[in-house]
């Protein structure tokens, strides 16, 4: 059974999403930005953001640093 939030604008979180993917989807939702905007902030292509959100790739050290610096988050919390 997948996790479903009850309000319409919630991030689309799947039961098999990694902790990092769930956090990234939530961040996008909270900040009310789209993939293209996040890509520009992080200095990567929109397709790379899409791959991160779909769990097809892992973020580079540079991308993690950009997330940490721009959004002031502790990235170590999102990895086991």
Image (cartoon, rainbow, N blue to C red):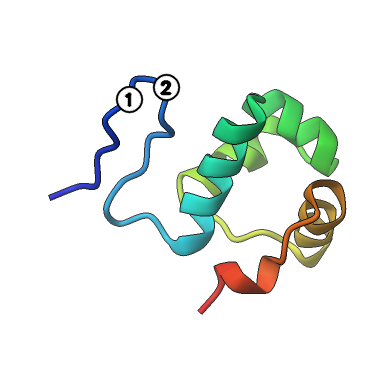
- Write down the residue under mark 1: 7
Q: Quadrant of residue 75?
A: bottom right
Q: Quadrant of residue 7?
A: top left
Q: Residue furthest top?
A: 8
56 or 8, which is in the foreground?
8
User: Looking at the image, which residue is at 52% across and 41% down?
Assistant: 25
User: Looking at the image, which residue is at 75% across and 35% down?
Assistant: 39
Residue 77 in percent (x, y) is at 60, 71
66 or 10, which is in the foreground?
10
- Tag count in the figure? 2
Q: Residues within 10 Å of mark 2 (few under 14, many from 20)?
A: few
Secondary structure under badge 2? loop
User: Looking at the image, which residue is at 83% across and 61% down?
Assistant: 65
Residue 31 in percent (x, y) is at 66, 31
User: Looking at the image, which residue is at 57% across and 67% down?
Assistant: 78
Does any portion of residue 56 appear in the rendered image? no
Residue 53 in percent (x, y) is at 52, 44
- Write down the residue under mark 2: 9
Does any portion of residue 22 appear in the rendered image? yes
Instruction: Compute the Cα span from label 1 to label 2.
Output: 6 Å
Question: For residue 41, which numbered disc appears in the image?
Answer: none
Q: Residues within 10 Å of mark 1 (few under 14, many from 20)?
A: few
Residue 37 in percent (x, y) is at 75, 26
User: Do tag 1 and tag 2 residues touch (Cβ < 8 Å)?
Assistant: yes
């Amino acid at each position: 059974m997948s996790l479903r939030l009850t309000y319409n604008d919630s991030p689309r979180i799947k039961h098999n999403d990694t902790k990092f993917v769930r956090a990234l989807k939530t961040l996008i939702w909270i900040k009310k930005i789209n993939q293209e905007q996040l890509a520009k902030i992080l200095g990567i292509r929109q397709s790379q953001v899409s791959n991160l959100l779909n769990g097809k790739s892992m973020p580079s050290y540079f991308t993690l640093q950009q997330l940490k610096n721009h959004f002031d988050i502790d990235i170590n919390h999102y990895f086991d």
